[in-house]
């Protein structure tokens, strides 16, 4: 979908549909008041009659209003003006775009970014509008033999902010467009089934991304992983017929500066191995490569924006399957770092592939490392589907991620990473166990990873609750691409500012 900025008066915008806001208590937005004046008070009459109350969730289409260039006007309920905030703004834009698409409109003029959102400027509103608009019409139906028959689809969406700085608005739109493209890539990869999106397929997608944007991509094969001593990663893949890969993809936008490293868990299907999962909802374990998909999506967004920052993506990827050759509970493996691990549960495999990838990441001499993983069911229980679990010993890095998440509306919640939890990983037979019992499962998983991060600033993002939806709306959410991209945008701005001093 083509996303543009057009700040002409709403009544002059010739289009298939125009979306304008109506509040529940205080009345019409500026564009709604303009349209009401042009058509002789029709909107005010509809409010008096109760046809549109302005409640959040309401949309009333009006057709061929006199003196209005748009063929349809969508009155979008925005709730009470004092309560109109980040979430209600995003929801209003998404509903308007989806409604226009369902009507068969080919283009939409959206005046909702003119609405005031506390502590947010026009750049933020345009960025968010671009992101949610792309997500609102996203469909994954390429694997259906007969895709659903639809009317014409929305091809163009133009946004206006009314008053404000149009240069900042355009900048925000460009960021939102790039982040939306990265989110689409993540969704496409994560929604694919495990028989298509294998480790080899992920490597091919990384190489295609590298070719398109001039990124340096390297794919390490099983023999090379064995030579490197990645015994933890290789223990996970033993039960699978799909060969494992370690993918690195480098974006260089800042000369010789040390990079930020993104390490993404890439289990393309997780059966649990010998510690096999229950059958119910096991199909959702195709999403266990969401960390890897988020790394590729973020790198696409960064490349689209041409950010002046260096980023390296590191993706350990394999399947976790049961087999006569699969790892067994009680096996002891030696990691690339030389530390040994007693594998008490083969379904705690994500940390095993990540620990070797984290050790490998040392060679890039990163200034910061963030690993991203659908790591623990405990995080879903603790935080639900709203916040990513953040664990790090680095207060400054935590603050950066929290601030980026708040701005991007892709929020994190910091959990403790105290040494008190480390003893839960004690093993009688190896340096550590790969699980720490039922208590504080998200924390002990991060404690395990922390033992492989002594040489760099590091943060762990547990995205198990936020990366995908279950049930009727099953599918990837594309989180945390907005969070990671905003983090890197801010890093780039900080480095640019430092270079000027």
Image: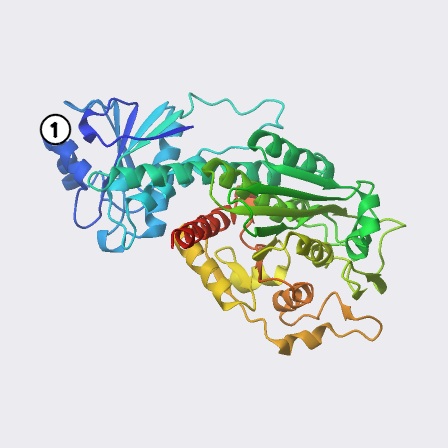
**143 lies left or right of 119:** right
- The front one of 334 and 386 is 334
- Snapshot quadrant of residue 440: bottom right
Q: Which residue is mark 1?
A: 38
Percent coordinates x, y for residue 61 in the rendering: 27, 31
Q: Is residue 188 visible?
A: yes
373 shown above or below 17: below
Q: Residues within 10 Å of mark 1 (few under 14, many from 20)?
A: some
- The front one of 94 and 208 is 208
Residue at 63% from the left image edge and 31% from the top image edge: 208
- The front one of 463 and 258 is 258
Residue at 79% from the left image edge and 73% from the top image edge: 427
4 shown above or below 419: above
Residue at 83% from the left image edge and 50% from the top image edge: 226
**35 lies left or right of 410:** left
Numbered disc 1: secondary structure: helix
Percent coordinates x, y for residue 293 in the rendering: 60, 43
- Snapshot quadrant of residue 329: bottom right
**13 lies left or right of 132:** left
Q: Is residue 479 visible?
A: no
Percent coordinates x, y for residue 377 in the rendering: 63, 59
Percent coordinates x, y for residue 288 in the rendering: 65, 48
- The front one of 424 and 181 is 181
């Amino acid at each position: 979908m083509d996303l543009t900025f057009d700040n002409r008066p709403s009544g002059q915008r010739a289009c298939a549909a125009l979306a304008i806001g109506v509040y529940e208590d205080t009345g019409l937005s500026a564009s709604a008041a303009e349209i009401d004046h042009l058509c002789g008070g029709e909107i005010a009459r509809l409010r008096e009659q109760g046809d549109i109350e302005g409640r959040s969730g309401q949309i009333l289409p009006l057709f061929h209003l006199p003196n209005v260039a748009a063929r349809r006007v969508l009155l979008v309920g925005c709730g009470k003006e004092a309560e109109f905030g980040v979430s209600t703004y995003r929801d209003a834009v998404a509903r308007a775009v989806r409604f226009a698409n369902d009507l068969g409109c080919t283009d939409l003029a959206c005046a909702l970014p003119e609405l005031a959102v506390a502590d947010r400027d026009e750049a933020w509103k345009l960025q968010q509008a671009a992101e949610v608009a792309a997500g609102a019409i996203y469909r994954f139906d390429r694997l259906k033999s007969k895709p659903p028959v639809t009317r014409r689809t929305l091809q163009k969406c133009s946004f206006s902010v009314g008053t404000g700085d149009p240069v900042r608005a355009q900048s925000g739109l460009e960021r939102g467009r790039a982040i939306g493209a990265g989110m689409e890539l993540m969704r496409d990869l994560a929604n694919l089934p495990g028989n298509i999106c294998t480790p080899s397929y992920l490597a091919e997608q990384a190489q295609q991304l590298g070719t398109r944007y001039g990124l340096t991509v390297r794919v390490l094969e099983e023999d090379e992983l064995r030579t490197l001593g990645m015994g933890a990663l290789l223990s996970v893949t033993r039960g699978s017929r799909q060969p494992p890969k370690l993918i690195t993809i480098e974006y260089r936008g800042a000369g010789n500066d040390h990079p930020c490293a993104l390490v993404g868990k890439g289990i393309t299907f997780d059966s649990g191995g010998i510690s096999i999962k229950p059958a119910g909802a096991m199909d959702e374990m195709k999403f266990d490569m969401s960390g890897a998909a988020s790394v590729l999506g973020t790198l696409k967004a960064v490349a689209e924006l041409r950010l002046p920052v260096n980023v390296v993506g590191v993706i350990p990827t394999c399947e976790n399957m049961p087999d006569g050759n699969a790892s067994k509970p009680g096996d002891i493996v030696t990691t690339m770092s030389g530390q040994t691990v007693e594998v008490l549960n083969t379904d705690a495999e994500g940390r095993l592939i990540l620990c070797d990838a984290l050790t490998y990441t040392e060679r890039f001499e990163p200034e910061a490392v963030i690993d991203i993983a659908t790591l623990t069911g405990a995080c879903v229980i603790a935080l639900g589907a709203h916040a990513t679990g953040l664990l790090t010993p680095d207060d400054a890095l935590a603050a950066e991620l929290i601030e980026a998440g708040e701005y991007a509306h892709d929020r994190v919640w910091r959990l403790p990473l105290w040494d008190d939890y480390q003893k839960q990983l004690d093993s009688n037979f190896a340096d550590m166990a790969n699980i720490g019992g039922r208590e504080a499962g998200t924390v002990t998983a991060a404690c395990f990873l922390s033992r492989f991060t002594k040489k760099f600033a590091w943060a762990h993002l547990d995205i198990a609750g936020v990366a995908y939806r279950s049930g009727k709306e099953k599918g990837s959410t594309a989180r945390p691409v907005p969070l990671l991209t905003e983090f890197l945008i801010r890093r780039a701005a900080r480095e640019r500012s430092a270079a000027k001093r």
